[in-house]
Every structure is written in C-alpha cells, then in structure tokens.
Image: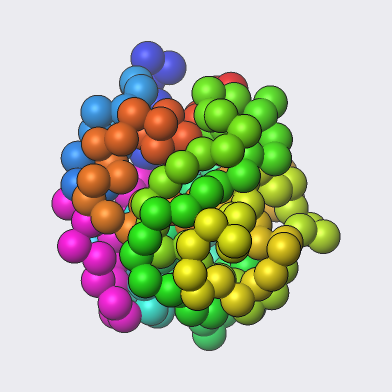
Amino acid sequence: MSAAAPRLLAYTRTTGYRHDSIPAAVTALHTLGPYEVTATEDPAAFEHPLDGYAAVVFLSASGEVLTPAGREHLTSYVESGGGFVGVHAAACTEYDWPYYGDLLGARFAQHPAHQPGNALVEDRTHPATRHLPAVWRFTDEWYDFRTNPRSSVRVLVSADESSYEGGRMGADHPLAWCHEKGSGRVFYTALGHASEAYEDPAFRAHLLGGINWAAGRD
C-alpha cells in the first residue's frame, strides 16, 4: 500500500434490503480524499487477511454477508488496528453474529418515512463533524436502534425527534458515533439513505471525516 494512495475496501453485498443509493455511494467514495477504492459484493474479498486496507467500509450492506472465514478475518483486522466504517444500512447487517453488534455499536430497529429533520451535532471536535453547524438540517430515514449505544461509544450526532415524525427512541437518539475496538477504530453514521446525500457537501465531508478518523489519518 502506497502512503500516497491508502486503500479502502468498500463492501456493498446485500442479502436483505438493497438501497438504490449504493452506486452513488460507491461513486462518492471514489471521489473523496486520496483513497484507492476497491468496491465489491464478493464475500471472497474477506477470505484472506485485510491488512493492506486503511479501512473497510460497509456501504449499506445488509443481511448476512460474510462467510465464517470472512468474519474471522474482519475480526482480526479490526482487533489488530484496522479501521471499520459503517454507513446507513450497515446497521442492518450480520444479525446472527454477536461480535458485529459490538463492533458497530447498535443494530437497526426501524425507521419512519424519509423526511427532513434536525440532526444535533454533539461533538464538533471530530473530523466527521467539525465542519457542521450545531443543528444540521438534513433529509434521511432517521434510523431507530434496538439499543442506545451511548454508554459504549462516543456519540457525535443525535436526532431531534421533535423535528420529524415517527421517531421512537426519545430524547436521547444517537445517529453517528465512533469508538475503539481492540486496537482498531470504528465509525458509524446512520445517514446516507438517498442518492442525493452523496452529492451533499456537508454529508460528503461527514463521511470523509469518519473514514479518515477510522483509517488513522486524522
């Protein structure tokens, strides 16, 4: 891996719901930062060590997407210092693998209609959020999660449920967060449902900042 061109592995396999925005998301990754992006739907990409990648990005992957060997390699990669980024439906992935729930921080429960709302930026010192206003007006699905991850992660952005219809988590509703797992770094954002998000400068900077942090570049 060249220092001038760190590599990202973008994984978009779906065995559950498939987002129409995946092609736009992949295109965005190719145009963000200095990264050389390998995008794949093939679980064989995880059948060998992942050490050559600066970060692995689950880009709206869904359902069960890894083989047992793939799970082992992803675990080893993160625990030994690799970066992991989950985007949107990454929270709807690998429900049968307990480690993945700990890795990501929380699992998807449900979402209301795609609609405008307010994201509250709690931590503006992180690379994924330092460019954002304190209240970030955005349009998305405003994922609810089965559990609140706050006790085990650094929450960066939360949802203001009073600003949209159908939220079920209440006053404390994390949307984007980061944490360390073993020697690795994990970043997750629930945003990114629609193709338009990947053309939005604020969201693109949010995503790039999260990738940079997970990859240890910021």
Spot occupied by residue 199 in the image (x, y as percentages of width and height): 25, 36
Does residue 197 lie above or below 144 as drawn? above
Spot occupied by residue 201 in the image (x, y as percentages of width and height): 34, 29
Residue span colored magenta: 9-23
**Colouring style:** rainbow
Pick whichever, 136 or 57, lies toward us: 136
In the image, taking residue 18 as reference, residue 163 lies left or right, namely: right
Q: Residue at x 74, y 53 (%)?
A: 153
- Residue 115 visible in the displayed image: yes
Magenta residue check for 151: no
Does residue 41 lie above or below 201 as drawn? below
Spot occupied by residue 159 in the image (x, y as percentages of width and height): 59, 55
In the image, taking residue 181 as reference, residue 163 lies left or right, namely: left
Pick whichever, 197 or 154, lies toward us: 197
How many numbered badges does the structure rendering display? 0
Does residue 32 lie above or below 114 as drawn? above
Does residue 26 lie above or below 76 as drawn? above
- Residue 58 visible in the displayed image: no
Pick whichever, 142 or 187, lies toward us: 142
Q: Which picture quadrant has residue 170?
A: bottom right
| Outermost residue toward the right in this view | 151
Q: Residue at x 55, y 47 (%)?
A: 119
Magenta residue check for 17: yes
Q: Residue at x 68, y 26 (%)?
A: 125
Q: Residue at x 53, y 29 (%)?
A: 132
In the image, taking residue 168 as reference, residue 197 lies left or right, namely: left
Quadrant containing the N terminus in the rendered view: top left
